[in-house]
Amino acid sequence: MSEVNTTTEQSQTGSGKMLRAMVGIGVICALLIVVTYEQTLPRIERLRAEALEQAIFKVIPGITKTKKFQRNEDNTFTEITRVNKTKQIVYAGYNDKDEFMGIAVEAAGQGYADIIRVLYGYNPETEKIIGFYVLESKETPGLGDKIEKDQSFLDNFSALDVSLDKSKIKNKVAAVKQGAKTNAWEIDGITGATISSRAIGALISSSTNDLVPLLYQHKQSFEINKSETKK
Amino acid sequence: MNSPSHHKANTGFFSSLKESPSTDVFIKGLWRDNPVFVQIIGMCPTLAVSNSAINALAMGLATAFVLVMSNVLISSLRNFIPKQVRIASYILIIATFVTMTDYAIQAISVPLHKSLGAFISLIVVNCLILSRAEAYASKNTIGKSMLDGLGMGFGFVFGLLCLGSVRELMGNGSIFGYSIFADSFQEWIIMILPAGGFFTLALWLFIFNLAKQKKSA
């Protein structure tokens, strides 16, 4: 009987100790992470902005400068110089003759491991997606990360059809099995990266569905010199 | 796992430094119990991220930093952590330093962070770090644990660099991005693919063990 009592007592003091240790370590760890986050955030944001700028040049071929536009509540687009974090931003690209070449749009969606952030280029003249670049992904190395490296997958986005029928996309972008692509609006998936390539298909599809009609409708507002450029 | 005495005969050219015990702790990780070539642990990042010298160096240094910091913190809290929750505590501490490293690498370079990708977060489960916490830091003083972390950490950097430089040299014709061979050099693409990691590891293990055998003979 007495033996039982001592064991219970021991385990009680034990759990108190355990709780104290875990909570104590938790607090120390949380503090360390918060301090590091606060210290590195400004520099990370600056580097990210630079990386984004470079990515825009990749997804709209042939441009030499970019401008930021923000999407207003009434779904129009106006040029901005300072980023307002609550508004969606798109980036217009121009060649050295100041001709409007296309729009880069950031899109994000759930991948296999974490949120995947991508940038794609849209050309309202040809009504096609003309470029694609993965900004951030934590997909499984060797499998899911093929969405960044597999050349035949990336080739899907050199001329992906997103043409409009009145004010809606004629055919929604969709990912299909590798080698099963028959239409210009389909994305050839990757064997071994099925979930990741489908996730890309889904996030491009929902983003284009939402934005492409608006971008097409307002494509005039991205032109630098409206009187000189033809329609 | 702590300083196996039967290895003492194999210390090689470091044997002159062996007099003081603190150097011994450091040398043990760097050479005698090298994590890559002797203990063969932490193989996942070793094989995966050693496709270029710069990736190998960055990954090695990140792991070494986490190892040293977690060893120090775990050692200083070793009397405070009850035995029953020690593994959970170690993982919590290791994960904290990995998160800090993740932010730090993002602040250093975005392309580097991109090329290391998910492997930074995966430092948490690198068995090298947990094994040092459990086998060494939880039983030794702060100073010794720090030295152990430094030794093992730089041993890991050394191992990764050995693999990374050979793979980049053969697979890309360069080291740290600087071209070594003439343009006519035909790259061995397989060396920067996963299979090349195994080939290079086998090659280094062969060289390392050959050298050891000669010393002890």
Image (tube, coloured by chain):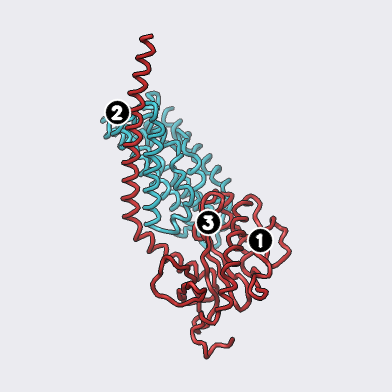
Instruction: Look at chain B in the picture and name its colour.
Output: cyan
Residue at coordinates 56% horizontally, 47% vertically from top-left?
B194
User: Label 2 amino acid?
Assistant: Asn
Q: Which residue is mark 2?
A: B79
Image quadrant in which the C terminus of chain B is located? top left
Q: Which residue is mark 1?
A: A174
User: Label 1 amino acid?
Assistant: Ala
Instruction: Look at chain A in the picture and name its colour.
Output: red
Q: Which residue is mark 3?
A: A116
Residue A89's x, y, as percent?
Answer: 47, 69
Relative depth, front residue between B181 and A7: A7
* Helix, strand or loop at mark 2: loop
Relative to B13, A210 lies left or right? right
Residues at marks 2 and 1 touching, judged by CB atoms closer than 8 Å: no
Residues at marks 1 and 3 touching, judged by CB atoms closer than 8 Å: no
Residue A194's x, y, as percent?
Answer: 64, 52
